[in-house]
Amino acid sequence: MSSDNPAFKAPLKDSPEDLSKAPPSPSSSTSLSPDRTAVGPSTGERALLWAGFPVLGAVVLWLLSRAAGWVASLPWAPLQGPFKLVASVPEPQVSIGAVILGVLLGLGIAFFAESEYVTAVIGPEQAVLTVDRVSRTVPRASTAAVFKDGKNLVLLGHDTTELARLRGDFDAERFAAAFQRHGYPWQPDGDPYAADFRRWVAAQPDLPEAAHALLKAREHALKKGHKEDAEQLRTELSALGIVVREGKDKAQQWRRVRAASGDADGTGA
């Protein structure tokens, strides 16, 4: 996620006050104090993640090590070389090695999956949102709508621009309860401006050339899996008054921001 959006206010790392507001791993919906709530995966979900993947990895690789000789004997099987190499290692070394490698592989997968969780510390003044080890701070006063959009948690400003869009795993019911507890305008029906979005097509006459150039570059970044570049381009489009998202077919969709009052006669498409 990019931190260039002017609506964001990154917490100061050296501030004791900010450090106290951002515990490292909020679980489920936890009341940190009367005025702040931490939201994230439950302790059980985290335990299953960090214990389940290493055990599964160990079991899978151990089974593969036991079947290595048989697989190596099949003339049509792929990866003949690696399987023959594994089959040549004596016991118990091959089993021990397979289990250790499986545990390490499982821990790596768990670490990656952990980074995909969306967590938050929500208070009456601001919400600190984190995904993929990157945090964003969104002031309550700037927030006009909060909702779930597919796998995204989205916060909109009063002019309908996106203050934050975080893609990851999160429990919408837990987040809804926490946001509502602190007076944030949670939208149970999703994006109130979903009807404004249009599929982006190159050379559309109602978009300026600069927006087309950014959308084309962002399309390329999405195809290449360059998430940071795509988010930076999202921020640059926001500066032009363009909100962008991906539809179910992964195609880019766009809309214009509206007037701060949110009236229908704003600049929305």
Image: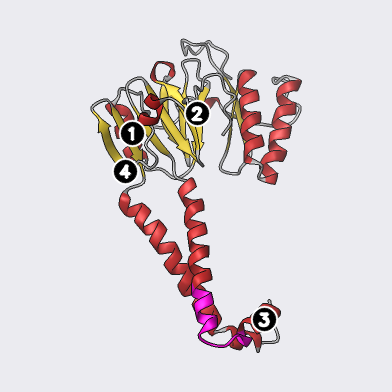
Separation of disc 1 and disc 3 at Cα? 50 Å
Q: Is residue 72 above or below residue 17?
A: below
Query: Label 1 belongs to which residue?
Result: 176
| Number of residues whose C-alpha sits closer than 10 Å to that of mark 1, classed few (under 14), some (14–19) or many (20 or more) | some
- The single residue placed furthest to the left in the displayed view is 34
Lower sequence index among marks 1 and 3:
3
Above or below, 103 against 49 in this view is below
Q: Are marks 4 and 2 in contact (CB under 8 Å)?
A: no
Q: Which mark is residue 247?
A: none
Q: Is residue 47 above or below residue 176?
A: below
Kindly identify the amino acid type of the residue bearing the numbered disc 2.
Ala
The residue identified by callout 4 is 28
- For the N terminus, the image quarter is top right
Magenta segment includes 89: yes
| Front tag of 3 and 4 | 4
Residue 58 % position (x, y): 47, 71
Q: CA distance from mark 3 to mark 4?
A: 45 Å
Q: How many marks?
A: 4
Residue 232 is inside the magenta segment: no
In contact (CB < 8 Å): disc 4 and disc 1: no
Residue type marked 1: Ala
Q: Please give the name of the residue rendered at 44% of the width and 40% of the height, measured from the top-left corner.
A: 118
Looking at the picture, how far across and down is residue 49, in whole percent? 40, 57
First in sequence, mark 1 or 2: give its number: 2
What amino acid type should be assigned to the residue bearing mark 4? Ser
Residue at left 32%, top 21%?
124
Say the numbered circle drawn on residue 164. 2
Q: Marks 3 and 2, Cα distance to the nearest angstrom?
A: 48 Å
Q: Which residues are magenta?
A: 87-99
Where residue 123 appears, x then y in whole percent? Answer: 33, 25
Q: Report the mark closest to the observer, 4 or 2.
A: 4
* Disc on res. 77: 3
